[in-house]
Amino acid sequence: MKFFSLKKKLIAWFLLWICLPITIFSSAFLFYESNIVKEEIRHYADKQISSLAAQMDWYFRSVQHISKNYYNDAFINSLVDPGHLRDRLTFLEDQMNLLSMKKVNNYTLEDTVLQVTVITWNGEIYGTNLYRRTFDAEQMRETQWYRQLVKNPWEILWIQDEFLSDLICDDKQSQVFNIWALKSPTTYAPIGFLIVDFSLEDLTRQFDGYFDAQELFAVQDMYGKTLFCSNEARLAEVDAVLHGRAGELEEDSVLTSPKYYHVGAETQHGRWSISLFTTQRAALNRYDSFIGFFLLAFTLYISLLVVLLLLVSNQIVHPIQSLTATIRLAQSGNMEARANIPSRDEIGELASAYNGLLDEINRLMDNITAENEQKRRAEMQALSAQINPHFILNTLTSIRALIYQGLNRTAEKAALNFAFLLKNVLSWEKEMCTLSEEMDCVRKCIELYQMSFEYPIRINLEIDPSLYDCMVIKMITQPIVENAVMHGLKPKEGDKSLSIQAIRDDGIKILIYDNGIGSADRFVFNEVNMKFGRGIGMQNVYNRIVLHHGSHYGLQFYSRPGEGTLVTLHLPYIREEGEAHD
């Protein structure tokens, strides 16, 4: 059954009975609110663009009214009359008249500087501007506005034009030109042009305060040329959107994101278009909405519920969590952990009872540990007792054979070696010895074994010098060496060799290899077995290793007939008695 904590249950109840109804209600409310917001934005954008278009149209009407005064004036029309006198004195007088008319006609737009220019069909220029260079009639005829007015002389144009801008010395201002065709009174064919120009800055100044800083405002003339953008850094993006090239913009462009809403309108005079890119935030800043109040109330409500949940958690869940943590520590092996819950309720009583249970378990474990240690020592002594008679019997038999053969000196040497082993090895006061001492005993044993051989056994010891002072179980290699000599090498004819190697690899590994007759038997040691059949020596060694060091260690047996035998002992790396360094 899957564990489900009490805290999770409380949170689940909280979500199910409180948050879920609130979430459903909030979702429905926010869906309704989003529709209101969209409608509000649409209403705001339409109102804003209508206001901007009306303001621009008023400005154009004002300029057009002044231009019409010039257009209907007889003096202006006389300037383009082919029979008009054109000497220097008359030219200066005409210029003064234009300046006088300018003072009279521009009174309706006091904050705007309007300049007047009259261009005759044969290339004469009269005006209140300062002009840069000689007029080029041929270049004028190549302009779009010239061809349009020749085709339709009754049309009134509002444009920006490079040709006309080049005529004006003041190049710091971006000018807008209102152009009228002056016609012949008989044929109504164009015989000149009346041009009233003003600064684009004067026009756009009329819209200061009409839109938010986050909004973008753009103006296009009648030819679709973008003349103004409230954010010059985004002029290229705005121009691409207005000309249907939004696909060319980069993916991170804000104008292509749902954040911006685009609306446009066209003025009645001049056929200019204005575009507004507004945002939801800009629209909602202008109008009141109750969503902010709702979100504030909802946040306070949720905060109170969270505080309530935390209080319940501290009173109920925290003591249970503390007891659970103590239980987990005990499960991991820390039997000294105790639950510290001072509350005087069922949870406090449960913690007190659990602490008492841990105390009783510790007492029982101490008793079991002592009994197991006594049992282990008894089993080790029993295993040692099995080795001693077996080793003593084989050794005495070998000495007897030497005496029977008359090899008294060899028998004497064997007896001395046997006495050394009995004195230094078979006294079981200590279970451990150094690897160096173990190898000395192995050498003595081998000398005893091979005294009965006709030819000596070739011995090869490869011991890592850093392992000589490591601690191993006494006589742990003797039964394996004895089996190798007596059962593997003795029956073999020819060259006989025994190799003992000690290496550091995940502890200590002692490899004992002989090139004897080998065996087809397979021995697998998986558990301690105190009932021995065949293979008593190796089972004894395995039992002693496991009883002393645990089941992570032991031995492996590998042999093939005619190829020899390899036995590998796996022991822990212990520098001093009782101190392991794996």
Image (cartoon, grey):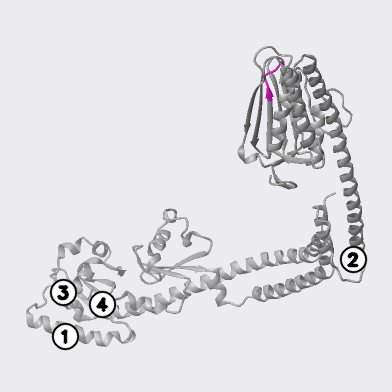
Instruction: Please name which of the two marks, 3 or 2, marks the residue nearer to the observer.
Output: 2
Disc 1 on helix, strand or loop?
helix
Q: Residue at x 65, y 73 (%)?
A: 291
Q: CA distance from mark 2 to mark 1?
A: 107 Å
- Quadrant location of residue 482? top right
Is residue 515 located in the magenta-colored stretch of the structure?
A: yes
Looking at the rendered structure, the kind of residue marked 3 is: Ile
Q: Residues within 10 Å of mark 1 (few under 14, many from 20)?
A: some
Looking at the rendered structure, the kind of residue marked 1 is: Met
Q: Position of residue 342 (x, y in %)?
A: 87, 71
Q: Position of residue 358 (x, y in %)?
A: 89, 58
Instruction: Please name which of the two marks, 2 or 1, marks the residue nearer to the observer.
Output: 2
Q: Does residue 54 sit above or below 460 in this rendering?
A: below
Looking at the rendered structure, the kind of residue marked 2 is: Ile
Disc 3 on helix, strand or loop?
strand
Looking at the rendered structure, the kind of residue marked 4 is: Tyr
Q: Position of residue 51 (x, y in %)?
A: 47, 76
In the picture, measured across the screen, residue 272 lies left or right of residue 328, that is left
Q: CA distance from mark 3 to mark 2?
A: 105 Å
Relative depth, front residue between 34 and 96: 34
Q: CA distance from mark 4 to mark 2?
A: 101 Å
> Which label is found at residue 96?
1
Residue at the spot of label 2: 347
> Which label is found at residue 71?
4
